[in-house]
Amino acid sequence: IMLSTGMINIMFKLFFSSSDGFIEYYLDHCDFNSSDLKDIEYIRSLYYNKVEYARFSSSLGKYVGYTEYGLKQADYFNSQASILAGLRATKETVCNTTLIMPTTELYGALWCKHSAMLVCSVYDFYPKQIRVKWTRDGQEVTSDVTSTDELADGDWYYQIHSHLEYTPR
């Protein structure tokens, strides 16, 4: 059984606003592209009047500018080792502690002499995107597999149930 997470944005912060609307703000989010924690990408996007002018990406380890002003800001931020170190620490404290690993239960149910069923129940995971795969001899099994959608538990966690019908050897 293999579990993997999809992409999700998890954290938003407002930096500065005024009574007439947003002037400048930043948006932090974590992208979960696999179940491997080292693949999580932390992104901080900087906006002015709804236009993204610069972005920090933990995959690149630096800021990239998108406007004339953003290019100058990116150059400045990238020259400040303490700013970059702080953002790397933010990734570790925000992204890696927000991922909730699931608990799984695998059990079998004998239906008759010629067929049986395995059930995999996955509980208490976040983010919602997850994939349950059945494998036999290292190859993914796709026939005779049924699964529920991700079911909300009502407490920000999810559960899913997958069934594999098979013929015992």
Image: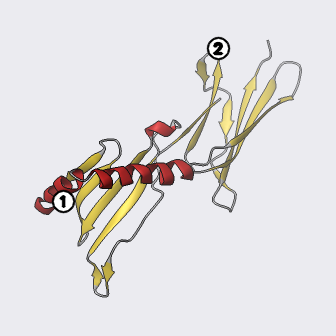
Which is nearer the N-term, disc 2 or disc 1? Answer: 1
- Farthest-out residue, bottom: 19
How far is mark 2 from mark 1, CA to CA? 53 Å
- Categorize mark 2 by other alpha carbons within 10 Å: few (<14), some (14-19), many (20+): few
Residue 148 drawn at (x, y percent): 67, 44
Relative depth, front residue between 168 and 89:
89
Query: Residue 144: x percent and y percent?
Result: 68, 28
Q: Residue at x 31, y 55 (%)?
A: 83
Label 2–label 1 contact, CB within 8 A: no
Residue drawn at (77%, 29%) of the image: 118
Report the quarter where the C terminus lies: top right
Numbered-mark total: 2
Looking at the rendered structure, the secondary structure element under dot 2 is loop
Res 27 label: none
* Residue 27 picture quarter: bottom left
Q: Which residue has dot 1 on it?
A: 73
Looking at the image, which residue is at 38% across and 71% down?
14
What residue would you read off at disc 2? 137
Image height of 145 relative to 14, above or below: above
Query: Which quarter of the figure has residue 162?
Result: top right
Q: Nearer the observer, disc 2 or disc 1? A: 1
Quadrant in the picture for the N terminus: top right
State the SS at label 1.
helix
* Residue at image coords 43%, 54%: 90
**Residue 4 at x, y percent in the picture:** 55, 37
Q: Amino acid at mark 2?
A: Asp
Amino acid type at image mark 1: Gln
Q: Residue 47 appears at what percent x and percent y? A: 26, 66
**As rendered, which of 86 and 156 lies closer to the eye?**
86
Tell me: residue 21, above or below residue 33. Answer: below
Q: Quadrant of residue 67?
A: bottom left
Rendered position, 111 above or below 45:
above
